[in-house]
Image (tube, rainbow, N blue to C red):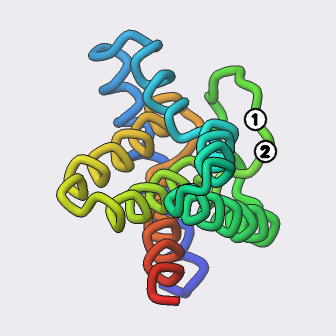
């Protein structure tokens, strides 16, 4: 099998696994649950909170503002490069972009989780769980495939860890 065949197979498996998760979630949760969980990863929410905390001269505000903005720039650039279409059966929603990879919500949740954990290390397990739930909710809402949120999470974790080391 050549390289293109391998990529096609990976894409088909990703779409199949993602669809199984959507079907599994449809019978288990009222639609409002994943929608509300996903909203906790919205950029406007974190920009507003970070801005307010920075205005209050809180170091955590500046750290959040920096990680959210840098993650958004990287995600926007990656989406322009990869241009992966969102799932066909997606629900109607208002979104800033039409591309799926990497998931901005997952990247932002990962970056925020790691950043908050630098200020409150004992909360790391709960913050990581929250980032996974936000990501999983995006699949249940048919806004992303599994690889979109995995890529987004890894990107967010990586950006936050690099910014911490600077």
Q: Is residue 80 something that shows in the picture?
A: yes
The one of 50 and 98 positioned closer to us in this rendering: 50
On screen, 91 above or below 66? above
- Residue at the (59%, 37%) spot, across then down: 143
The residue carrying mark 1 is 95
Residue 93, quarter of the rendered image: top right
Q: How far is the residue under mark 1 from the one under mark 2?
A: 7 Å
- Residue at the (68%, 49%) spot, across then down: 55
The one of 119 and 138 positioned closer to us in this rendering: 119
In front of the other: label 1 or label 2? 1
Secondary structure type for disc 1: loop
Query: Label 1 neighbourhood size at 10 Å, few (<14), some (14-19), many (20+)?
Result: few
The one of 28 and 165 positioned closer to us in this rendering: 165
Query: Residue 111 location in percent, x, y?
Result: 49, 62
On screen, 24 above or below 14? above
The residue carrying mark 2 is 98
Residue 43, quarter of the rendered image: top right
Tell whether 53 sits left or right of 154: right
Secondary structure type for disc 2: loop
Residue 150, quarter of the rendered image: bottom left
Query: Residue 97 location in percent, x, y?
Result: 79, 45
Label pair 1/2, CB-CB below 8 angstroms: yes
Q: Is residue 107 something that shows in the picture?
A: no
- Residue at the (69%, 39%) spot, across then down: 44
Query: Residue 28 location in percent, x, y?
Result: 27, 16
Tell whether 43 sits left or right of 163: right
């Amino acid at each position: 099998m050549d390289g293109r065949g391998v990529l096609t197979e990976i894409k088909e498996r990703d779409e199949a696994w993602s669809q199984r998760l959507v079907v599994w979630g449809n019978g288990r949760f009222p639609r409002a649950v994943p929608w509300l969980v996903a909203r906790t990863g919205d950029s406007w929410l974190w920009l507003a909170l970070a801005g307010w905390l920075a205005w209050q001269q809180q170091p955590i505000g500046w750290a959040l503002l920096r990680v959210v903005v840098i993650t958004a720039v990287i995600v926007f650039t990656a989406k322009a490069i990869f241009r992966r279409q969102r799932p066909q059966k997606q629900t109607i929603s208002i979104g800033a972009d039409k591309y799926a990879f990497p998931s901005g919500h997952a990247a932002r949740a990962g970056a925020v989780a790691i950043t908050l954990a630098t200020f409150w290390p004992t909360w790391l397990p709960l913050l990581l769980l929250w980032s996974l739930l936000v990501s999983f909710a995006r699949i249940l809402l048919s806004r992303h495939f599994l690889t979109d949120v995995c890529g987004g999470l890894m990107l967010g974790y990586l950006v936050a860890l690099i910014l911490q080391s600077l």
